[in-house]
Image (cartoon, rainbow, N blue to C red):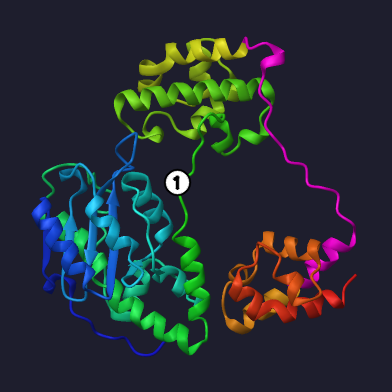
Amino acid sequence: MGSRKKIIPANQVPYQIVTTSHAMQAAVKALASAPKVGVDLEADSMYHYQEKVCLLQLATADRCYVIDPLAFDNLDLLRPLFARPDVQKIFHGADYDVRSLYRDFKIVVNNLFDTQMASRFLGIRATSLEAVLHARFDVTLDKRFQRKDWSKRPLPSKMIEYGARDSLYLIALAEQLEAELQDHARLTWVQEECRALSQVRPSSSDGLPLFLNFKGAGRLGPQSLAVLEALLHYRNKIARQKDRPLFKIISNQALLKLATGKPSNLKQMEKIEALSRKQIQWYGPDLITVIRNAVQTPQADLPVYPRNKAPRLPPMIPERIRALRTWRDKKAAELKIDPTLLLTKAMLAAVAIAKPLSSTKLNKIEELNEWRRQVLGQDIIHILKHTH
């Protein structure tokens, strides 16, 4: 990676708080003239039922604009900037940010570059922004405000300065990573991965059972599953009423204990030791009612956890997967990167099942994008030609 490079300390770079339409228009004009913009955001998921973006930091090489979304009805003025293909938007760990920007403001990001993904493709193991900046620029980030409530107003100046700081390093970091990726002939790989990343969207569970997104639900029988679903709806209702995150009402672990234990009175609930005394005092009687009603669900109406049975595969498929995995792991070791960056488990299976023996057939496998076909395609075909 070379010696550490010194950059201008973030506290010496000016930042501007944007809370009016006039200031927003000026900020957008300045940002649109920059070739690269560092992007970071702060949300309030630790404090409210419906999380939202509470601060948006956009930095050029010499200035940062700290935008307060809570001061605006919408952020429509920012949409063209994020959509512009000629302005690179630099994130670190973009998945959550891209989903949040679309969820709250219908902002679509074009020309995205993710410095965390870039770091992974360079074989860097510690890829948090804090670790990467310390290793490359000898910068130590102050994380004391990371878990604060960013929805409170007015925000203390120290929190605003903290929010601005991370984004101010992203351009210098991206430029260094891009140069190294180019040297390793991997820049196009990351660019293609970033294009896919820019298209992620918030998941929607409209009309689907809540237990489908609950870890451990698949181990429950139908009656316990019915109880869990009822408990999840109850927790949602209380969290919405109190405007608190779900985990601050009742933890997932506690709900699982209640769903399997099915206490029919408060004494039984205390013995399960799922809830604190205060939680039993606040929610106990209602929870008992919820559990009793769910237990009485008719047999025919009890939910069943959906299980997609994997199709029975011919014995040669696992053999192909093993051959491909062995080759992949060796290739990854040579490149000094995580093997799953080359081919995931799902990709290995898709290739093994299709068994493409030509580039034309390889190109038809949807799970493989362009860089993988070009870089790995001939090796894949060669391996499959020598397996059953």
Tell me if residue 99 comes above or below residue 309 in the rendering: below
Q: Point out the stretch of residues depicted in magenta.
A: 296-325
The mark total stands at 1
Q: Is residue 117 left or right of residue 308?
A: left
Q: In the image shown, does 114 or 12 lie closer to the viewer? A: 114
Going by the numbered disc 1, the residue's amino acid type is Pro
Q: Quadrant of residue 309?
A: top right
Up-down relation of residue 10 to residue 270 (above or below): below
Left or right for 202, reference 346: left
Q: Quadrant of residue 26?
A: bottom left
**What residue sits 21% from the left and 68% below the top?**
31
In the image, residue 265 lies at what x, y percent?
Answer: 51, 10
Q: Secondary structure at mark 1?
A: loop
* Residue 21 horizontal/vertical position (percent): 12, 51
Left or right of residue 146, residue 202 in this image? right
Q: Where does the N terminus fall, quadrant-wise?
A: bottom left
Give coordinates of residue 114: x percent, y percent: 41, 68
Magenta-span inclusion, residue 32: no
Residue beneath the point at 65% across and 67% down: 368
Q: Residue at x 58, y 72 (%)?
A: 338
What residue is rendered at 39% in x and 68% in y? 111
Any magenta on residue 299? Answer: yes
Residue 333 visible, this orientation: yes
Residue 212 horizontal/vertical position (percent): 58, 35
Q: Which residue is mark 1?
A: 202
* Above-or-below relation of 104 to 283: below
- Classify mark 1: residues with Cα within 10 Å, few (<14), some (14-19) or many (20+): few
Q: Quadrant of the C terminus?
A: bottom right
Residue 122 in view here: no
